[in-house]
Image (cartoon, rainbow, N blue to C red):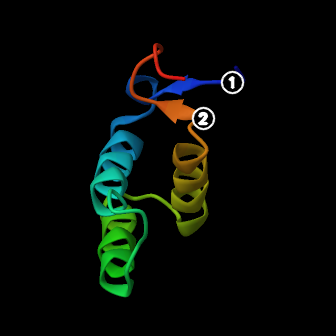
């Protein structure tokens, strides 16, 4: 098991973005309309595009987890 970061340890704006991201990619992909919603979300939360992409990549790789019991 590698490095794991608890979602709750992130700043609230990043947690909110990842919660939105998780809901939208629940079906396995991001449509063009979903990407527009995510773009609006990260901008509204004051995140940069680069940071949003980093968060998405870490979430998809399961580096960021909801609880420390996830593997």
Check the image and report above or below for 63 versus 58. Answer: above
Residue most extreme to the bottom: 32
Which mark sits nearer the N-terminus, 1 or 2?
Answer: 1
The residue under the point 52% across, 45% down is: 59
Mark 2, Cα crowd under 10 Å, few <14 / some 14-19 / many 20+, is some
Residue 50 sits in which quadrant?
bottom right
Determine whether the residue tagged by mark 2 lies in a helix, strand or loop: loop
Question: As rendered, which of 45 and 36 lies closer to the eye?
Answer: 36
Residue for badge 2: 63
Residue 38 sits in which quadrant?
bottom left
Check the image and report above or below for 15 versus 2. Answer: below
The residue under the point 34% across, 81% down is: 36
The residue under the point 32% across, 56% down is: 26
Q: In screen coordinates, is 54 left or right of 17?
A: right
Asked if disc 1 and disc 2 are in contact, CB closer than 8 Å, the reply is yes
Residue most extreme to the right: 2
- How many tags in the picture? 2
Residue most extreme to the top: 69
Q: Return the x and y of residue 2 as percentages of the image width and height.
A: 72, 23
Mark 1, Cα crowd under 10 Å, few <14 / some 14-19 / many 20+, is few
Point out the image quarter for the C terminus: top right
Residue for badge 1: 3
Q: Return the x and y of residue 1 as percentages of the image width and height.
A: 70, 20
The residue under the point 39% across, 27% down is: 66
Label disc, if present, on residue 71 of the rendered structure: none
Determine whether the residue tagged by mark 1 lies in a helix, strand or loop: loop
Question: As rendered, which of 70 and 14 lies closer to the eye?
Answer: 70
């Amino acid at each position: 098991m590698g490095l794991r970061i608890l979602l709750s340890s992130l700043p609230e704006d990043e947690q909110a973005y990842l919660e939105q991201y998780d809901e939208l990619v629940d079906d396995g992909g991001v449509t063009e309309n979903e990407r527009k919603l995510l773009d609006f979300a990260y901008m509204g939360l004051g995140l940069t595009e680069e940071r949003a992409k980093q968060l998405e990549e870490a979430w998809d790789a399961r580096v960021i987890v909801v609880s420390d019991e996830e593997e």
